[in-house]
């Protein structure tokens, strides 16, 4: 199992390194350590959300409302800031709000048995609509936000901004959660074979519910980070970002059918997209090609997944049996 | 719901009109906007009131639907026709949908002009554009040039690569760059009017062109994101971010120095000029036909083109001195 997993991650890691080397040929400044740190910082939001989405996808669900949750929590964070709520209260409150929004998705999937893609497609639109309602369609701009609110994610701490450290912290927590806790194992069990999971005493609906809550909470946290980083909050922030997040998961080898994937894969998938996004503008590729290139990368990744998917699924299930 | 809205808007218009019956000799100009409660149009109303005060015998009826729909505007116009106003100046939610009802208004002897967002020629006597593509293009390069007396490199951060407005403005800007031989346009980047993509593109521009002196962003999302990227890269003072933005969104970045100034059309002037023109046409002092020269009071004169359209003025320039005052308005 370790060999297969590392090989998948190794492939992706090599692909990223080759890509960075190719970029460096055309634009040497890209590989300067400071710039690579910038790229990582820029990809932090994608890494956090890819992990959140991974938890959901592992349980055979999908969370399309993740970017809308981010935007709604970001707008609420900005509005609380304008109203004078201290930052120390804003961050836990938006995480709670995000968890609540995730719980709505989770409950609909768990208690009403509605397919997750339908639930989150609906809540995606609802959450965006709520932003419009609470903000009246108005923007919250940088001069309305307090200095502390904006400076927290960009504050430097041990060579990296807090935004990057947040992503690293989430990665570590996820590595423990997925690999070392009963909940993490139950995500795989539920996605890999729901019927078998029931026989082992796992409540499938409740596990999916918890995955949605985790996803929402992380989207809430990212909402604050996003709004503070770009110093603007409006209805359409992070529009279409849910697709980037799903793409990062798919590229990272997380099976859309559930039950297979790894933290390292999700992180590398996010970094792969992050490098592409940051490199395409500097190496002077026409904007019309940029979209086509991102799309090609996604399809290639899915093609690789499809050819490997069958064996992978079996191997992961075997390991789940061992643990159980 | 829709009936209720009609009733309410009609009632509101009726009240406004009845309140003015006492002055039988005053002329009534209705300013119909895309929707009520939008800062930009509240500022237009301010300008219209200013013109009314200057003209003396004109009363402004500021009205519009509660949502930006053509249906809502049709209800409002029908109510205005019933109340026999003298002129209607409209910023349309739809170019074509309003033509029949506005034709009806013109048939009843009401002067109809459009401003800001125009109506098809059949539905109005003339259209007043806030500015023209040429004027905006000139303004964009002038703002950048003013901040870099020694010349140097500039880059453009636009919306999407297919955005009609932005492409026209950028082409006009390129056309007027011959007046600034020591300024070189390095690249036109596209941020797709997304805050994160625009931010990334601005970062890439700074990396690619270390000697970049100005980023010109003719889009409200792009200019903000570029200003934020310049602040985060600690390039304030080296790179000036300019372009088209709204004062309420840009005031902070003007104060940090990331943007030394930016432009947008002035809604107060637009309301003032539209009212002046409406008055001139309804009192038959002038006729709206291609080539006609219309007087706009303190805003000067406007010449109509073959489509009956005219451009008011250069976009209005905002910098640290006046941005706070306008940030409260729009």
Image (cartoon, helix red, strand yellow):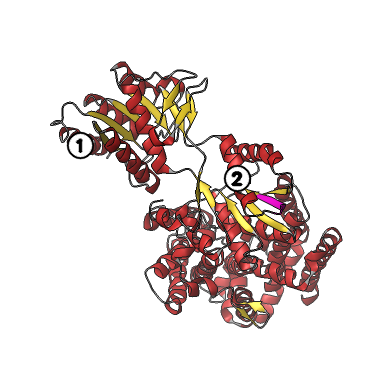
- Determine the secondary structure under disc 2: helix
Residue at x-position 54% and y-position 73% = A151
Is residue A102 in view?
yes
Same subunit, tags 2 and 1: yes
Q: Which mark is residue B140?
A: 2
Q: Which residue is mark 1?
A: B16
Distance from disc 2 to disc 1, alpha carbons, whole Å, reads 41 Å
- Residue B154 in magenta stretch: yes
Task: Classify residue A57 as left or right of residue B271.
Answer: right
What range is drawn magenta here?
A: B150-156
- Residue A57 in magenta stretch: no
Establish if B10 lies above or below B306: below
Establish if B303 lies above or below A159: above
In this view, which residue lies farthest toward the top? B107
For marks 2 and 1, give the one nearer the viewer: 2
Q: Main secondary structure of the magenta part?
A: strand
Residue at x-position 57% and y-position 76% = A200
Q: Please state the chain letter of the residue tagged with numbered disc 2 in the rendered image.
A: B
Residue B81, picture quadrant: top left
Task: Classify residue A280 as left or right of residue A129.
Answer: right
Residue A197, picture quadrant: bottom right
Return the x and y of residue A230 as percentages of the image width and height: 56, 63
Return the x and y of residue A43 as percentages of the image width and height: 66, 66
């Amino acid at each position: 199992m370790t060999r297969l997993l590392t090989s998948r991650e190794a492939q992706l890691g090599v692909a990223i390194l080759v890509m960075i080397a190719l970029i460096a040929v055309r634009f040497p400044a890209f590989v300067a350590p400071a710039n690579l740190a910038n790229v990582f910082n820029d990809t932090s939001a994608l890494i956090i959300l890819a992990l959140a989405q991974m938890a959901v996808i592992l349980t055979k669900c999908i969370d399309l409302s993740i970017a809308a949750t981010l935007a709604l929590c970001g707008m609420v964070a900005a509005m609380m800031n304008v109203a004078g709520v201290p930052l120390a209260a804003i961050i836990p409150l938006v995480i709670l709000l995000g968890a609540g929004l995730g719980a709505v998705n989770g409950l609909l999937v768990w208690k009403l048995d509605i397919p997750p893609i339908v639930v989150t497609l609906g809540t995606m639109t609802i959450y965006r609509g709520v932003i419009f309602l609470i903000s009246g369609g108005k923007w919250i701009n940088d001069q309305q936000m307090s200095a502390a609110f904006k400076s927290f994610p960009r504050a430097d701490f041990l060579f990296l901004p807090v935004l990057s450290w947040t992503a690293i912290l989430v990665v570590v927590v996820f590595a423990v959660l997925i690999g070392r806790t009963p909940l993490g194992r139950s995500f795989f069990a539920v996605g890999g074979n729901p019927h078998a999971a029931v026989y082992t005493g796992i409540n499938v609906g409740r596990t999916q519910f918890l995955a949605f809550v985790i996803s929402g909470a992380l989207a809430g946290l990212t909402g604050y980070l996003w709004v503070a980083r770009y110093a603007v909050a409006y209805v359409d922030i992070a529009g279409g970002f849910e697709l980037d997040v799903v793409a990062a998961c798919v590229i990272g080898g997380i099976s859309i059918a559930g039950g297979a994937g790894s933290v390292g894969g999700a992180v590398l998938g996010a970094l792969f997209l992050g490098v592409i996004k940051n490199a395409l503008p500097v190496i002077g590729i026409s904007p019309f090609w940029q979209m086509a290139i991102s799309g090609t990368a996604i399809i290639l990744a899915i093609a690789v997944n499809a050819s490997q998917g069958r064996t992978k699924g079996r191997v992961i299930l075997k390991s789940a049996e061992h643990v159980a | 719901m829709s009936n209720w809205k009609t009733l309410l808007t009609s009632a509101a218009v009726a009240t406004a009109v009845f309140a003015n019956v006492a002055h039988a000799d005053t002329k009534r100009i209705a300013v119909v906007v895309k929707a009520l409660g939008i800062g930009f149009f509240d500022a237009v109303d301010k300008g219209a009131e200013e013109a009314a005060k200057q003209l003396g015998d004109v009363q402004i009826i500021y009205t519009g639907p509660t949502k930006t729909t053509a249906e809502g505007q049709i209800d409002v116009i029908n109510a205005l026709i019933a109340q026999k106003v003298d002129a209607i100046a409209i910023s349309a939610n739809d170019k074509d949908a309003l033509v029949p009802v506005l034709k009806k208004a013109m048939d009843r002897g009401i002067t109809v002009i459009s401003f800001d967002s125009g109506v098809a020629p059949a539905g109005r006597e003339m259209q007043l554009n806030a500015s023209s593509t040429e004027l905006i293009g000139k303004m964009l390069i002038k703002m950048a040039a003013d901040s870099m007396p020694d010349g140097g490199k500039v880059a453009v951060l636009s919306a999407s690569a297919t955005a009609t407005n932005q492409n026209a403005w950028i082409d006009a800007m390129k056309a007027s760059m011959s007046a600034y031989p020591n300024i070189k346009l390095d690249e036109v980047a596209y941020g797709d009017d997304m805050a994160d993509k625009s931010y990334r593109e601005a970062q890439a521009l700074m990396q690619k062109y270390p000697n970049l002196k100005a980023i010109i962003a003719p889009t409200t999302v792009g200019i903000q994101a570029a200003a934020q990227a310049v602040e985060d890269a600690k390039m304030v003072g080296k790179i000036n971010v300019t372009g088209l933005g709204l004062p309420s969104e840009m005031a902070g970045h003007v104060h940090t120095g990331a943007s030394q100034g930016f432009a947008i059309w002035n809604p107060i002037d637009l309301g003032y000029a539209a009212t002046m023109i409406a008055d001139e046409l309804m009192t038959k002092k002038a006729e709206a036909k291609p080539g006609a020269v219309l007087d706009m009071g303190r805003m000067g004169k406007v010449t109509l083109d073959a489509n009956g359209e005219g451009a008011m003025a250069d976009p209005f320039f905002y910098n640290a001195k006046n941005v706070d005052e306008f940030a409260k308005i729009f």
